[in-house]
Amino acid sequence: MNDLISTFTNLELRALWELANERSELKIRSGVVDKLLVDDNTSAEFAYIGLKGEYAVCKFLDTPFDMDHFAGQDPGYDTTMDRETIQIKVQQSGLFFLPTTESLTADLAIKVVPNSEGGKDPYLKGGAHTNRNVAIRGWIGKQEFLTMCGPATIGKRDVVAVNDNVLRPVWTLGTQR
């Protein structure tokens, strides 16, 4: 793989953890329940894992990381680049997967994976995503995903997926569109 490793300072991790807790509280107050909690992580831990991926991609793309992006609503994308919407997913398996084909609402998707460099994350207690750093695995355009995806099973869930080996290296974003 052509993973791009992203590291975090202690200050960045603390800010992301605080934001994750705020988002989690907002979801709890509004009655929104996470449909898919990984490894029995709490809602705040689940949000934190996703925020680390979003922040890593925004740092790499040099796009603003909008702290208020999900204030009460989810527009279906995590950031934008050159007017294209980007959905960011943090996943551990060798597949890039979504619950359904309709779940990819952005123009393209970027997969981020846990990375063992840098040791254990100070805010995560257990499960598969306890590593401090992450690696940006690659990206796929919406039409490519819709054309190439097939049925798969992750745990007990039926999903649609493509193998990680079809993801393009993240540094090619903007050059192969």
Image (tube, rainbow, N blue to C red):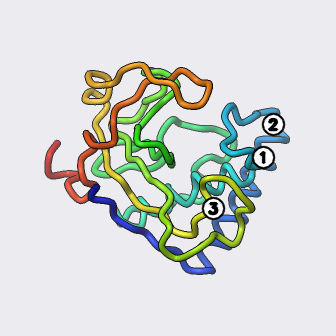
Q: Nearer the viewer, mark 3 or mark 1?
A: 3
Q: Nearer the viewer, residue 56 or 161?
A: 161
Q: Which mark is residue 130?
A: 3
Residue projecting furthest to the right: 29
Q: Are marks 3 and 2 in contact (CB under 8 Å)?
A: no
Q: Horizontally, is 46 left or right of 75 in the view?
A: right
**At label 1, which amino acid type do we have?**
Leu
In the depicted structure, whether residue 166 falls above or below residue 16: above
Secondary structure at numbered mark 3: loop
**At label 3, which amino acid type do we have?**
Thr
Q: Horizontally, is 5 left or right of 171 in the view?
A: right
Q: Are marks 1 and 2 in contact (CB under 8 Å)?
A: yes
Q: Quadrant of the C terminus?
A: top left
- First in residue order: circle 3 vs circle 2: 2
Q: Which mark is residue 30?
A: 2
**At label 2, which amino acid type do we have?**
Ser
**At 62% from the left edge and 25% from the top edge, which residue is drawn?**
156
Q: Are marks 3 and 1 in contact (CB under 8 Å)?
A: no
Q: Quadrant of the N terminus?
A: bottom left
The residue at which mark 1 appears reads as 26
